Structure formats: C-alpha cells, structure tokens
Image: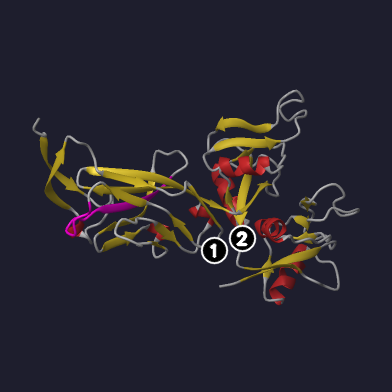
Amino acid sequence: MIPVLICALVSLSVADNLDTAYPELEHSRTIYVTENGPGLSVLSEQSKVVSRRGGNATLPCKIHREEPLAPSRKMRIKWTKMTSDYLKEVDVFVAMDQHKRSYGRFHGRVHLLGSSPLDASLVITELTLEDYGKYKCEVIDGLEDGTTVVSLDLQGIVFPYYPRLGRYNLNFYDAERACRDQDAAVASFDQLYDAWRGGLDWCNAGWLSDGSVQYPITTPREPCGGKNTVPGVRNYGLRDKEKNRYDVFCFTSNYKGRFYYLIHPSKLTYDEAVQACQKDGAQIAKVGQMYAAWKLLGFDRCDAGWLADGSVRYPITRPRRRCSPTEAAVRFNGYPDKKHKLYGVYCFKGQN
C-alpha cells in the first residue's frame, strides 16, 4: 500500500498578539504529513514545581521525536499561563529559532533552559505571588504539535481577612485590593484546600481567585453547615463579583526583608506607631508579613501590636498561658480606636 500524502499550505503566527516588530516570525510554507501519524510528543518530567516568592523556578518541558530534528527545521515553542476559568490564556514566552519574546509582567524574567535543542523548559526568575498557577508548554513543528501542563506552587500560608468595615463588606474587586494591600494575593481553591488539610478552620465565607466563595471547616458545628455534616471546604459556588459581598482568603509567601516588634519605651497610638517605624528606617508591617513571619520563620511574640490596616495582632508559635494557651496562631485583637495608646507596633524593613 502506497502511503497517502497530504499537502497543505499553512500560515503560522508565533503568538496571537505578536506585533509587527517581528514580521519574520510569520510565514507560509508547504508541509507534508504521512498517514503514519505524528512523530512529535511533548512531556514534562514532573507535573508540579514548588518554589517561593523571590526565588526561581524551572518548569520542565521536553520534546521527543521519532526522527532526528533537521538543522534547518524551526520549531515554535510557546508558554502560556492558564487562568482560573481555563477559558483564557496569558502569553508568557515564545521562541522560534533565534527569535524570542517575553510578555507583560513576565518580560525580562523568563527564558528557555536550553540544555539541548529538544529542551523547551522555562525558567522564571524573581517569582511573585501572581506567578502561582498552571502553565502550558506548546510545541509546533509543521503540522505536528504537542502540549504539556505544569503547575507552579509557592510555599506560603492562607489567612482569612476582613477590613475595618467589618465582615462581609468586600466584593471580589475589593477583596483583590484588600489582599494586595496586605502583601498577599487572593488564594486559589487548591491553596485553601491545602490550608484546610493543614488544620485551617474558619466559619466565615470568603472569596477565592476563581470568583467562588468558600470556607474551610475541620470541626463541624452550628452554624457552620451543621453539627451532623462532615469536615470539608464548604462551597457557595460562583458569585456576582460586583454585587455580592463576603470576606476573603488571602495567600502570602516568603518576603525579602525583616519583620520585627519595635522595642519602644511606651505604648503607642496608631499614628505614633506609624511614625515610630519610620524613625527606625522601616514601615509599619502588613498583615501578610506577620502571617509569613509566623508560619515560615517561626516568629513568636506575646505583645499585641499595631499593623498597617489599623488592626492589632500578635503571632504565637509556642502556645502558653496568657498568650495563646491552646494553639499556635496569629491572635487578633480587632480594630481598636486608633487613638488608644495601648499597643506596641510591628515594623518591616524591606530589601531592594
């Protein structure tokens, strides 16, 4: 039987939004494909890579071919970041031959590992909280193509948050700003689920990054879904991002800098606390920085102190009488009157 040959003329664009600065990357050519099927496959050595904010990560992507790659062949390699609804993808990096381009907030922070001509692994440097998520490696060689997906996870901690206005006062966009203001990002479901498995129990519903509203329960009780229910993450489903109002679950990771309790001869009002940190060459610390110091560095201090959002909290890793007798936790004293001269202050010195 004589193999069937299919001749097709295709126009291949390197990236959907690639501008005219790289016209040589868009071209037409004749390609022949046999009935024996594709000889190209794309694989990842691991489905998840774990790193930390400020660090680097290498997302593995290897190309396999049944036949050696001819020196004149030019494969297209494209990395995209998948969004929470999986309907959109954000361009990260594209390469063909010597032409390479990074996009958006990834510009200047990504490059191919390039250990061999068939290595399409992506290196991301100076990781941010927003880099967390799933990435797709796509390789196109003529009419053959292959893809693989790799998850980038970050070491960190999920914490529930509501502002001075009180509970259930944040729509989704307010929630995004609230987390960002506290050196954090809105947590994903996977991050909340991992936190629940680690013992997080919180009876107030909060936004997650996919626009859903959920909350984790380890000890079923009234009114947290009922005493006769099983432990788990309770799900309200997707909510109207403009109209509906809830709390939020934030996620933060390692930071570059120093978090500390400022030794001061007297207790402070909120304004005095802000000034005291500034005089020490620092800024008043944020809630996310306290949680990161507590969870990731084991920071322990039995002194209630002001934070940037006007709340008063203190971190305990060693439960003890008069501090936190039953559990390790970031203890929350609420949002007191800012004129009360009753508390110390936690400061943060960042590193450029």
Residue shown at 88% from the left, 54% from the top = 320
- On the rendered structure, is 13 left or right of 133? left
Dividing the image into 4 quarters, which one contains the N terminus? Answer: top left
The residue that disc 2 covers is 254
Q: How crowded is mark 2: few (under 14 residues within 10 Å), some or many (20 or more)?
A: many
Is 71 magenta? The answer is yes
Q: Earlier in the sequence, mark 2 or mark 1?
A: 1
The x and y percentages for residue 15 are: 28, 51
Discs 2, 1 touching: Cβ within 8 Å: yes
The residue that disc 1 covers is 54
Q: Nearer the viewer, residue 173 or 5?
A: 5
Q: How far apart are marks 2 and 1 (CA)?
A: 7 Å
**Going by the picture, which residue comes out furthest to the top?**
228
Query: Identity of the amino acid at label 1?
Result: Gly
Q: Is residue 212 above or below residue 274?
A: above
Query: Identity of the amino acid at label 2?
Result: Asn
The x and y percentages for residue 245 are: 61, 38
Magenta stretch, residue numbers: 68-82
Dividing the image into 4 quarters, which one contains the C terminus? Answer: bottom right
Q: Is residue 181 above or below residue 188?
A: below
Q: How crowded is mark 1: few (under 14 residues within 10 Å), some or many (20 or more)?
A: some
The x and y percentages for residue 183 are: 61, 58
Residue shown at 50% from the left, 53% from the top = 130
